[in-house]
Image (cartoon, helix red, strand yellow):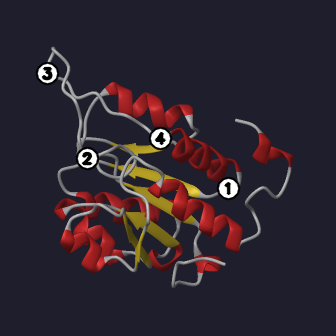
Amino acid sequence: MSGINYDLSKIKGFVFDVDGVLSPSTIPLGEDGYPRRMVNIKDGYALQLAVKKGYRIAIITGGKGIAIQTRFESLGIKDIYTGASKKLPILKEWLSKENLSPEEVAFMGDDIPDLQCLRHVGLPCAPYDACWEAKETAAYISKFSGGYGCGRDIIEQTMKAQGKWMSDAEAFGW
């Protein structure tokens, strides 16, 4: 049974921020001044499985860099928006492009720049260590912190509710 108080059968798409959600909120800087992000392998597994199962997935992040693009493209995600200073217009454009209603989408964000998107979707989610305002806005707060499995948490619960988690041989590979 899901711990998410939402009709998960409605969910057809997921949108994620990166820093503080799919990567921990503490990011080491390299000697060249560029951030080095960690990613969670379990989040990655769930993301690529969700893509294979036909869910629409978007990444909308203020972060920049080829590493973000490369990481999420390698998981099969096509809609990757980096350097997003204003996320809501991008979310609305993506919803229109994918022919999705806000009620069919879960968005996970952790900080002030994510609040408008959290307020716009049917299932607003936040990592355990999100800022107070994001937690207050979220319908679901993961028991996992950003970068430590919160992305997998909402994907797994949704797919289980829809009977798609470990439903066939496709689940046992990358």
Mark 1 or 4 closer to N-term? 4
Residue type of the residue flagged with mark 1: Gly
Residue 36 horizontal/vertical position (percent): 28, 27
Q: Tell me the residue that label 4 is attached to.
A: 40
Number of the label disc, if any, that sits on residue 33: 3
Whole-angstrom CA distance, mark 2 to mark 1, is 29 Å
Q: Reading the chain from its start, which is encountered first: label 4 or label 3?
A: 3
Label 3's element? Answer: loop
Q: Are marks 2 and 4 in contact (CB under 8 Å)?
A: no
How far apart are the two marked residues, 1 and 4, measured between alpha carbons? 22 Å
Residue 169 screen position, x and y as percent: 86, 46
Q: In terms of sequence position, does the residue under pointer 2 or pointer 4 come before the other?
A: 2
Residue at which label 1 appears: 54
Marked residue nearer the N-terminal end (1 or 3):
3
Q: Which residue is mark 2?
A: 25
In the image, residue 8 sits, relative to residue 39, either above or below, namely below
40 left or right, relative to 90: right
Kindly check if marks 1 and 3 are in contact, taking CB atoms under 8 A apart as contact: no
Q: Which image quadrant: the N terminus?
A: bottom right
Closer to us: mark 2 or mark 3? 2
The residue that appears at 58% across and 39% down in the rendered structure is 76
How many numbered marks does the figure carry? 4
Q: Residues within 10 Å of mark 4 (few under 14, many from 20)?
A: some
Percent from the top left, x then y, of residue 83? 23, 42
Q: What amino acid is labelled 2 in the image?
A: Ser
Residue 105, above or below 1:
above
Q: Which amino acid does the dot numbered 3 rest on?
A: Gly
| The disc label shown at residue 131, or none | none
Q: CA distance from mark 4 to mark 3?
A: 23 Å
Q: Mark 2: few, some, or many residues within 10 Å (few <14, many ≥20)?
A: some
